[in-house]
Image: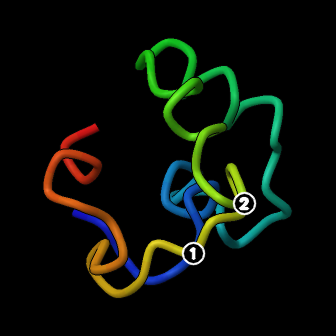
Amino acid sequence: TLFAGTVAENIAYRDLMRDIDMEKVVHASKIANADEFIMALPDGYNTNIGQRGSLLSGGQKQR
């Protein structure tokens, strides 16, 4: 499930009560083979994906 916010906020979902640890976010995305895709987005990890990922295509959401 995706929620309104940035890519980084969606990856760090359970840690949103604290500052996002970008090293952990990038590490997790690399393990998921999503880092290259994320970096190709207009603002990388800071790209807003919209409510439930509405700003992403169907294929992008699956990533």
**Amino acid type assigned to the residue bearing label 1 in the image:** Asn
Q: Position of residue 40 (x, y in %)?
A: 60, 40
What residue is drawn where x is 31% and y is 72%? 53
Query: How many callouts does the rendering have?
Result: 2
Of circles 1 and 2, the one toward us is 2
What residue is drawn where x is 60% and y is 63%? 9
Vertical relation: 58 (above or below) 18: above
Relative to residue 35, is residue 34 drawn left or right?
A: left
Q: Residues within 10 Å of mark 1 (few under 14, many from 20)?
A: many
Kindly identify which residue carries mark 2. Answer: 43
**Amino acid type assigned to the residue bearing label 2 in the image:** Asp
Task: Tell me the quarter of the picture where residue 3 sits.
Answer: bottom left
* For marks 1 and 2 on the same chain, the one whose residue lies earlier in the sequence: 2
Relative to residue 58, is residue 25 drawn left or right?
A: right
Task: Tell me the quarter of the picture where residue 54 sits.
Answer: bottom left
Q: Position of residue 14 (x, y in %)?
A: 52, 57
What residue is drawn where x is 24% and y is 53%? 61
Label 2 residue SS: loop
* Disc on res. 6: none
Which quarter of the rendered picture does the N terminus lie within? bottom left
Q: Are marks 1 and 2 in contact (CB under 8 Å)?
A: yes
Kindly identify which residue carries mark 1. Answer: 48
Please state which of residues 52 and 24 is positioned toward the viewer in this rendering.
52
Task: Tell me the quarter of the picture where residue 42 sits.
Answer: bottom right
Relative to residue 17, is residue 53 drawn left or right?
A: left
Measure the C-alpha gap from mark 1 to mark 2: 8 Å
Please state which of residues 14 and 27 is positioned toward the viewer in this rendering.
27
What residue is drawn where x is 31% and y is 67%? 2
Which quarter of the rendered picture does the C terminus lie within? top left
Please state which of residues 14 and 58 is positioned toward the viewer in this rendering.
58
Please state which of residues 13 and 32 is positioned toward the viewer in this rendering.
32
